[in-house]
Image: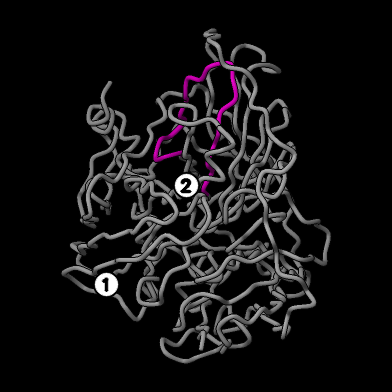
């Protein structure tokens, strides 16, 4: 079945959408396993032009569901950008969706006018992007960044992968071509009439964020993918508005983490589960050559606990239902169907050191900044007691300075904190969790659970100008949980 036929009849890549067959359990830790994985996984197209056109379309999905969708280049997910370090990236963004928008290149270090600051939104017409790729190989992504309406635009389909390669990564001879799978994971809601909808309640806007009750991978509900009994490279992206996933295999097999937000880790790390918050990415190696019965490997989001942080707000968070299964629920994600083809492939021979990385030293930090995130009655989630204002400078940093930022979560819900224009290193976390494998490398987004204090070290060497940092729970961001940083 070709891609267009699949879109018409299955609706799988007609957006990051869903089918009622994938409704999940509504209890924390209650696992849902679909009766069958019905649809073949679809891989995003590769961008083959210098044009990115955002458009609106009324879609009929699987011949029975309807969606007022948004698309990049009539493709959902948006086309994948693949480019090598040192090359120049030029693209013309055309906004034809009937409302303000702008593109943010998430994780990329670019000049401020190229970064997608909300002040640069356009209501119609085009916006020109032109910048040099001057950072390491990694799995980055792009999505809209208008103030107050980022959540619905991403939810309705405007997002895509931005993959950078370099010589260091290519020398490792990691699985490539058909053995490299970019996978964006998202949750969505559908009503009894078959309409895919975005309509956050007040508790969802003010507390939990928009948590769906259906899971999709690359826009496909209950997907499967046929693999050979050999290692595969999976580029994972949590493209959900608010849901956190705990990536695992149902049979408990281990996998190897190769990279995080900012590319390769210093060393490979083996694990059996991996938390991935909205906006975060993980580059993993999964070997299907042994350890699986029935020629099937099932990827799941394993249940996990979310601290309530106690107090009145913690109790309110538990009492105020959000419609979808609560944060930490277990979900089935997809199935890998393992064939019998043997071929000449051998296990990937990973070196003990993947990348030669020089992280900033704590002794080089000129300042420690406290970034307190909180929930204020009648105002919502704030950063250092403030809601976002478009041009107010909240943090001023001298270009080239190294600083330690301590994110302090005083609220009752998780906050994935994202800083534009930089990559940082996680130093420490106070609470009940340890540093996880992806946090041994470069990051641009870090999950801060209720009651946690997370310290990161960062050198602000991006071009001078105004950027933002914010919570990547998109309902929190849209409600004003964002602040400006100016590099001077």
Tell me: residue 488, above or below residue 77.
below
N-terminal label among 1 and 2: 1
Mark 1–mark 2 Cα distance, whole angstroms, equals 32 Å
Local SS, label 2: strand
Mark 1 Cα-neighbour bin, 10 Å: few <14, some 14–19, many ≥20: some
Residue 280: percent from left, percent from top: 57, 55
Residue 384 is inside the magenta segment: no
Residue 475: percent from left, percent from top: 48, 67
Q: Nearer the viewer, residue 96 or 326?
A: 96
Residue 39: percent from left, percent from top: 40, 26
Q: Which image quadrant: the N terminus?
A: top left
Which residue occupies 22% across, 31% down? 4
Residue 225 is inside the magenta segment: yes
Which residue occupies 68% across, 33% down? 350
Where are the magenta residues, as a range? 217-237
Which residue occupies 64% across, 41% down? 247
Tell me: residue 108, above or below residue 46.
below
Residue 357 image-quadrant placement: bottom right
Check if mark 1's residue and mark 2's residue have beta carbons within 8 Å: no
Tell me: residue 231, above or below residue 53.
above
Q: What is the count of numbered marks?
A: 2
Q: Is residue 213 left or right of residue 455?
A: left
Q: Is residue 468 left or right of residue 432?
A: left
Choose mark 1 or mark 2, whichever is in front: 2
**Residue at mark 1:** 100
Q: Nearer the viewer, residue 384 or 236?
A: 236
Which residue occupies 68% across, 45% down? 274
Is the magenta region chiefly helix, strand or loop? strand
Mark 2 Cα-neighbour bin, 10 Å: few <14, some 14–19, many ≥20: some
- The numbered dot on residue 165 is 2
Residue 365 image-quadrant placement: bottom right
């Amino acid at each position: 079945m070709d891609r267009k036929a699949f879109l018409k009849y299955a609706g799988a890549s007609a957006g990051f959408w869903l089918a009622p067959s994938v409704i999940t359990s509504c209890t924390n830790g209650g696992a849902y396993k679909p009766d069958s994985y019905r649809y073949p996984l679809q891989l995003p197209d590769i961008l083959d032009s210098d044009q990115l056109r955002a458009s609106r379309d009324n879609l009929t999905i699987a011949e029975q569901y309807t969606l007022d969708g948004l698309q990049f280049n009539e493709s959902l997910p948006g086309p994948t950008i693949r480019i090598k370090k040192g090359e120049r990236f030029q693209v013309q963004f055309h906004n034809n969706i009937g409302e303000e928008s702008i593109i943010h290149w998430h994780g990329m270090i670019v000049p401020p006018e190229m970064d997608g600051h909300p002040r640069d939104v356009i209501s119609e017409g085009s916006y020109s992007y032109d910048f040099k790729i001057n950072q390491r190989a990694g799995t980055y992504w792009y999505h809209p960044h208008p103030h107050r309406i980022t959540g619905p635009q991403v939810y309705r389909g405007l997002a895509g992968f931005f993959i950078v390669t370099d010589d260091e990564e290519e020398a490792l001879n990691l699985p490539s071509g058909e053995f490299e799978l970019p996978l964006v994971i998202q949750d969505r809601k559908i009503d009894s009439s078959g309409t895919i909808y975005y309509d956050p309640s007040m508790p969802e806007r003010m507390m939990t964020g928009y948590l769906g009750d259906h899971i999709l991978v690359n826009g496909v509900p209950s997907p499967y993918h046929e693999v050979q009994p050999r290692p595969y490279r999976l580029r994972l992206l949590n493209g959900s508005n608010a849901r956190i996933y705990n990536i695992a295999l149902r049979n408990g097999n281990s996998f190897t983490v190769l990279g995080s937000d900012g590319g390769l880790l210093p060393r490979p790390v083996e694990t059996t589960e991996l938390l991935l918050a909205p906006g975060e990415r993980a580059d993993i190696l999964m070997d299907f050559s042994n350890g699986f019965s029935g020629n099937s490997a099932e990827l799941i989001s394993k249940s996990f606990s979310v601290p309530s942080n106690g107090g009145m707000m913690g109790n309110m968070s538990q009492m105020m239902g959000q419609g979808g299964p609560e944060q930490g629920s277990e979900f089935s994600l997809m199935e890998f169907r393992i064939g019998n083809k043997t071929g000449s492939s051998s296990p990937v021979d990973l070196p003990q050191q993947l990348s030669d990385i020089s992280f900033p030293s704590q002794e080089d930090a000129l300042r420690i900044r406290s970034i307190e995130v909180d929930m204020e009655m009648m105002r919502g989630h704030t950063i250092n007691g403030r809601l976002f204002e478009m041009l107010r400078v909240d943090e001023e940093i001298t270009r080239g300075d190294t600083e330690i930022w301590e994110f302090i979560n005083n609220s009752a819900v998780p906050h994935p904190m994202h800083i534009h224009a930089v990559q940082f290193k996680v130093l420490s976390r106070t609470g009940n969790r340890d540093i996880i494998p992806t946090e041994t490398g470069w990051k641009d987004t870090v999950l801060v659970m209720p009651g946690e204090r997370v310290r990161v070290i960062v050198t602000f060497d991006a071009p001078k100008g105004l950027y933002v940092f914010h919570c990547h729970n998109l309902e929190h961001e849209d409600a004003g949980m964002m602040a400006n940083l100016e590099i001077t």
